[in-house]
Image (tube, rainbow, N blue to C red):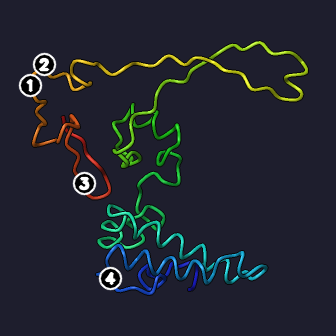
Amino acid sequence: MANGEKRDYYEVLEVHRNASDTEIKKAYRRLAIKYHPDKNPGDKQAEDSFKEISEAYEVLSDSQKRAQYDQFGHAGLGGGGGFNGAGFGFGGGTPFGDIFGDIFGDIFGGRQQRGRGRRGDDLLYNLEISFEEAAFGVESRIEVPYNKRCGACGGSGAKPGTEPKVCPTCRGAGQVRFQQGYFSVSRT
């Protein structure tokens, strides 16, 4: 492809646009085995193909990324003209994503993995060790404080003998998220 143009991810994985998740996974495995660098040592073209296959699978195996790709092509993923903050350290699991997400309310689209919990505070411990332990290594045990789940309600906040009710609008998340163009908007 000229000037770094990216191939269609469906073509890369040799599947139809309406391929199921299972078909995409099978195609990825077949091609990944074929072009894996360990099977093709020193073959730059095979290495490049493997990277392209992995990139295509990363997008097509994720339902949100796939929907964005289907609608906007490569531009919808942030690398080809769209902006989701991916190239600027605002996305993924970076601390900048957490910091800027907290300040700006995730307008950069960096925290789309709502399944994971919020990152906890850093813990700092002073542990005295000898010079020899520092030089040669040592294993030490430390106690990390943590909150225990309430025995009465199991952490749900419901009174004993009652069932917790989940909000039908946000499904217990406390906010509703929707996409407007390249921006993700949250509303409480």
| Tag nearer the camera, 3 or 1 | 1
Q: Are marks 3 and 2 in contact (CB under 8 Å)?
A: no
Q: Quadrant of the C terminus?
A: top left
The kind of residue tagged 2 is Lys
Please give the name of the residue rendered at 53% of the width and 46% of the height, measured from the top-left corner: 89
Placement of 166 over or under 146, stated as above or below = below
Q: Which residue is mark 2?
A: 159
SS for tag 4?
A: loop
Which of the two discs, 3 and 1, labels the residue nearer the N terminus? 1
Residue 83 percent coordinates (x, y): 41, 57
Dot 2 and dot 4 residues touching (CB under 8 Å): no
Q: Which residue is mark 1?
A: 162
Q: Position of residue 27 (x, y in %)?
A: 46, 81
Crowding at dot 1, Cα within 10 Å, few <14 / some 14-19 / many 20+, comes out as few
Q: Residue at x 24, y 55 (%)?
A: 180
Q: Residue at x 53, y 42 (%)?
A: 94
Residue at mark 4 to residue at mark 1: CA–CA distance = 47 Å
Answer with left or right where residue 107 lies relative to residue 127. left
User: Which class describes the residues within 10 Å of circle 4: few (<14), some (14-19), or many (20+)?
Assistant: few
- For image coordinates 44% across by 86% down, the residue present is 11
Which one is nearer the viewer's eye here, 81 or 42? 42
Rendering coords of residue 16 (x, y %):
35, 86
Amino acid on which disc 4 is placed:
Arg
Q: Earlier in the sequence, mark 3 or mark 4?
A: 4
Give the residue number, with chain letter if any, for mark 3.
179
Does the CB distance between marks 2 and 1 fall below 8 Å?
yes
Circle nearer the viewer, 2 or 4 = 2
Does label 2 or label 4 sit earlier along the sequence?
A: 4
